[in-house]
Image (cartoon, rainbow, N blue to C red):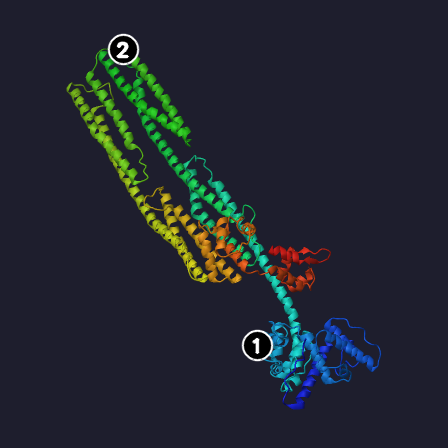
């Protein structure tokens, strides 16, 4: 029930009353005409309702109800009956018309008629205004104050004097339609400002002019009812458009968010597919374990592997960290906006990426081991090939001097000469026999190279085949020569024991000299100072053997002296002479000196290698300890507000970033080690691959911390969870996160939500549903999901209902919306996006089902 609002009576007498009445006549007449078509409009409000017919039409229009037909008679009785029908219907609506009767309306009592119209305006125009649960009048005033706040010269405190200078009307128009007038360039006087506002309102907004600018300016206090009536028309004009704007904004927010989600999902799937494809390609490439046929092929593959470790993989590790953060941000956005979680298709889960990455790391480690073994194998084959070449060269040189002896046809001319030839042949055959082990050794080398599929083994086999042919011919010729001389020995019995003794001693010394020379000429290959020490020890052993052999040289020198004393100047049993034996001794000494020089050079090279090892070890050990220190500090949870925690996490991120240049230095030093063929380093606590793995792990941990805290801030701001509650949830989550994986298993998840007071109710159905929705598909419940579950228990936002209601507003209360309505109220790109997602509404052409679309977004 509503009473007439009575204004405070003015103190300036009848003049003011007359002015107020004039203002009410104009404004109330204009208000009545807003409900009539042109033919029904009134001109004199005092006489317009005299017969009751127009009053009945007005009541029908403002109430939306149908009244009984009017009386058709022209008598006063009929007119009174029509007026009563209208007044009775107004009263039935709970509206009090205190002191207003049908007689007074019939008699054209202007004061009573104005009072009646004011009651109608108040109840059907103003009372439906609701602003922050205030009364209609106070609510309308508050709405005006909010809409004009911040406009220079506006201070709306009432519905009379606050509107006299016209600025308040101009501010209301500019607030909602800034395109219609320039508030900063308004006319300089009140009357012109009022007329500008009234003109714009009528011509551009369809609000009829209900006030007179001159009356407003000249009145000490404009009529409150007239001003309220006119201002309420502004409210209804703008409130209707505001509801559509709010609905449009809400739909656009949802569509914009949904489009962002679709774009983020597409980006995740594209980046995920690209990364998984790269991992699969590298996995297949690094899985090969076919032996290399050449050292050149090995070096190419080894360089490619080093490029993978130092360049390709670190870049992909950063890409993987960014992809995980992108996925986490997407899920957080969905959770805090009350949307279902995104579940990638099988094979594209974050856990799938991590598994593929771990498998690649295993293959990388195996590849590293395989390559180093291959390097050792190929280097060993190269050494064997060089050894074969040296030994075969020495053998060929030796054999070329022996074939002439065993193929000789001379048999001597007496016993002495035969004996001399036999002794000479025995010496040669002894030499040949002593040399047989070396031929056998050459065969063993060939067999070993052939078994290892050495690249040049066919050339070596060809050389060895020729050696075998020559060796067979040498032995056969020796046997033939022996038989020939033995037959001749029956004729020739003289034996020169002294020459034979010399020949035997010379043969022994010659064989020893060749063997020792071979040892001294062998390549020196070391990989550490320990290897150098072993080579030096072997060299010292050779020198001791040479020192011990000095007595043999002294002995043959003594025999040689005896031959000279006996007058023997030649020795047909041996090609060696005292001078040739001395030459052998000098060659041994020269070989010792050359060997000593090679050892000195190799020792110097290894000392340089030691220096490289130390150069790498110092920064590598320093960096490894630094990263372990950062890792230990990161594991300790920061305290303070989330912003303070984020700041601390960013400091850690900066520390980790500072490690990257140091890691690059270690990579460069490691490359120098690789180029120098140094693969072992006893001084370094960490290898380059271990440092890279530590850095990747540390960078991932820092990124996860930052992402987690950022998500907590997002959830706090969106859900209204206090930092104290967030801290409580974090402590509970960390307490039950036993393996520190950042995810809770099923039993730990149950314990954690119970620990923070989550009500699971009776039985396990609610918990099983929570686990299925949040943990089963993703390998456990993350902290973001855990917090979202708790916050949803405390607050239900009901966003789907709000979206449906917003669509209904734009659709004019229909159950479907048209393309034209979407394009009218939404931005083009969002309208286009909505039309790709909305389904046609059954039975309506150009109609779309917005309810099922809304349900699909939130379910």
The quadrant the C terminus occupies is bottom right
- In the displayed structure, 494 sits above or below 618; it is above
Q: Most extreme residue toward the front, as rendered? A: 762
Residue at numbered disc 1? 151
Q: How many marks?
A: 2
In the rendered image, residue 666, in percent from the top left (x then y), is placed at 37, 49
Labels 1 and 2: the sequence-earlier one = 1
Q: Residue at x 24, y 23 (%)?
A: 508
In this image, 503 relative to 185: left or right?
left
In the rendered image, residue 593, in percent from the top left (x then y), is placed at 24, 35
| Residue 526 in which image quadrant | top left
In this image, 196 relative to 102: left or right?
left
Q: Is residue 594 visible?
A: no
- In the displayed structure, 574 sits above or below 30; it is above
Q: Most extreme residue toward the top, as rendered? A: 490
How far apart are the two marked residues, 1 and 2, measured between alpha carbons?
Answer: 142 Å
What secondary structure is found at the residue carrying circle 2? helix
Judge by depth and name the residue closer to the eye, 711 or 276. 711
In the rendered image, residue 394, in percent from the top left (x then y), is placed at 31, 27
What secondary structure is found at the residue carrying circle 1? loop
The quadrant the N terminus occupies is bottom right
Q: Which mark is residue 488?
A: 2
In the rendered image, residue 489, in percent from the top left (x then y), is placed at 25, 11
In this image, 855 relative to 690: left or right?
right
């Amino acid at each position: 029930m509503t009473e007439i609002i009575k204004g405070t009576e003015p103190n300036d007498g009848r003049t003011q009353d007359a002015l107020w009445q004039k203002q009410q006549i104009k404004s109330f007449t204009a208000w009545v005409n807003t409900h009539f078509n042109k033919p029904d409009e009134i001109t004199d409000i005092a006489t317009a309702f005299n017969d009751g017919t127009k009053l009945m039409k007005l009541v029908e229009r403002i109430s939306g109800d149908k009244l009984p037909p009017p009386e058709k008679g022209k008598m006063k009785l009929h007119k009174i009956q029509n007026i009563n029908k209208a007044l009775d219907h107004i009263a039935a609506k709970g509206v009090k018309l205190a002191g207003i009767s049908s007689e007074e309306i019939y008699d054209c009592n202007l004061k009573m008629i104005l009072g009646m119209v004011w009651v109608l305006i108040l109840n059907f125009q103003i009372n439906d205004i609701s602003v922050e649960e205030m009364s209609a009048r106070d609510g309308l005033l508050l709405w005006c104050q909010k809409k004009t706040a911040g406009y220079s010269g506006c201070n709306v405190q009432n519905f009379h004097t606050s509107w006299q200078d016209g600025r308040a009307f101009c501010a209301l128009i500019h607030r909602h339609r800034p395109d219609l007038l320039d508030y900063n360039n308004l006319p300089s006087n009140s009357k012109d400002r009022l007329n500008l506002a009234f003109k714009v309102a009528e011509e551009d907004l369809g609000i009829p002019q209900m006030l007179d600018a001159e009356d407003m300016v000249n009145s000490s206090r404009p009529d409150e009812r007239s001003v309220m009536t006119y201002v309420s028309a502004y409210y209804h004009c703008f409130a209707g458009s505001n509801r559509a704007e709010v609905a449009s904004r809400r739909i656009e927010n949802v569509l914009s968010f949904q489009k962002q989600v679709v774009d983020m999902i597409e980006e995740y799937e594209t980046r995920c597919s690209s990364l998984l494809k790269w991992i699969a390609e590298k996995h297949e490439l690094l899985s090969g374990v076919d032996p290399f046929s050449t050292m050149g092929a090995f070096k190419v593959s080894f360089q490619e592997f080093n490029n993978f470790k130092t360049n390709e993989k670190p870049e992909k590790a950063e890409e993987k960290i960014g992809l995980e953060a992108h996925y986490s941000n997407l899920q957080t956005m969905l959770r805090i906006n009350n949307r279902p979680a995104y579940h990638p298709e099988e094979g594209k889960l974050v856990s799938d990426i991590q598994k593929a990455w771990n498998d690649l790391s295993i293959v990388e480690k195996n590849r590293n081991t395989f390559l180093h073994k291959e390097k050792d194998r190929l280097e060993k084959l190269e050494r064997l090939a060089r050894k074969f070449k040296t030994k075969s060269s020495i053998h060929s040189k030796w054999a070329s001097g022996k074939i002439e002896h065993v193929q000789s046809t001379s048999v001597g001319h007496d016993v002495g000469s035969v004996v001399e030839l036999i002794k000479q042949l025995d010496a040669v055959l002894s030499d040949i026999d002593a040399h047989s082990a070396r031929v056998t050794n050459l065969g063993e080398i060939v067999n070993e190279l052939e078994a290892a599929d050495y690249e040049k083994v066919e050339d070596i086999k060809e050389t060895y085949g020729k050696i075998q042919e020559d060796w067979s011919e040498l032995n056969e010729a020796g046997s033939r020569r022996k038989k020939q001389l033995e037959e001749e020995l029956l004729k020739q019995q003289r034996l020169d024991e002294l020459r034979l003794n010399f020949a035997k001693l010379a043969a022994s010394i010659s064989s020893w000299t060749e063997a020792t020379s071979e040892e001294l000429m062998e390549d020196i290959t070391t990989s550490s100072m320990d290897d150098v020490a072993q080579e030096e020890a072997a060299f010292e052993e050779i020198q001791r053997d040479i020192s011990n052999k000095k007595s043999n040289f002294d002995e043959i020198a003594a025999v040689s002296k005896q031959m000279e004393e006996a007058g023997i100047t030649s020795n047909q049993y041996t090609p060696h002479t005292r001078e040739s034996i001395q030459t052998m001794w000098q060659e041994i000494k020269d070989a010792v000196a050359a060997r000593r020089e090679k050892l000195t050079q190799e020792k110097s090279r290894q000392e340089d290698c030691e220096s490289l090892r130390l150069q790498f070890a110092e920064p590598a050990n320093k960096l490894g300890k630094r990263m372990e220190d950062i890792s230990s500090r990161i594991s300790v949870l920061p305290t303070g507000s989330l912003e303070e925690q984020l700041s601390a996490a960013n400091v850690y991120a900066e520390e980790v970033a500072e490690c990257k240049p140091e890691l690059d230095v270690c990579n460069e030093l490691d490359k120098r080690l690789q180029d120098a063929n140094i693969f072992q380093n006893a001084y370094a606590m960490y290898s380059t691959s271990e440092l890279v793995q530590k850095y990747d792990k540390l960078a991932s941990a820092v990124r996860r911390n930052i992402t987690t805290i950022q998500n907590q801030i997002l959830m706090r701001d969106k859900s209204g969870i206090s930092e104290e509650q967030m801290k409580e949830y974090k402590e509970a989550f960390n307490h039950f996160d036993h393996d520190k994986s950042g995810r809770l298993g099923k039993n730990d998840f149950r314990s954690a939500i119970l620990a923070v007071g989550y009500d699971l109710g009776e039985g396990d159905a609610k918990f099983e549903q929570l686990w299925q929705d949040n943990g089963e598909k993703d390998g456990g419940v993350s902290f973001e999901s855990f917090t979202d579950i708790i916050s949803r228990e405390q607050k239900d936002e009901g966003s789907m209902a709000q979206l449906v209601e917003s669509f209904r507003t734009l659709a004019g209360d229909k159950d479907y919306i048209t393309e034209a309505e979407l394009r009218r109220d939404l931005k083009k790109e969002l309208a286009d996006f909505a039309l790709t997602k909305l389904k046609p509404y059954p039975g309506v052409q150009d109609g779309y089902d917005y309810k099922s679309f809304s349900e699909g977004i939130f379910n």
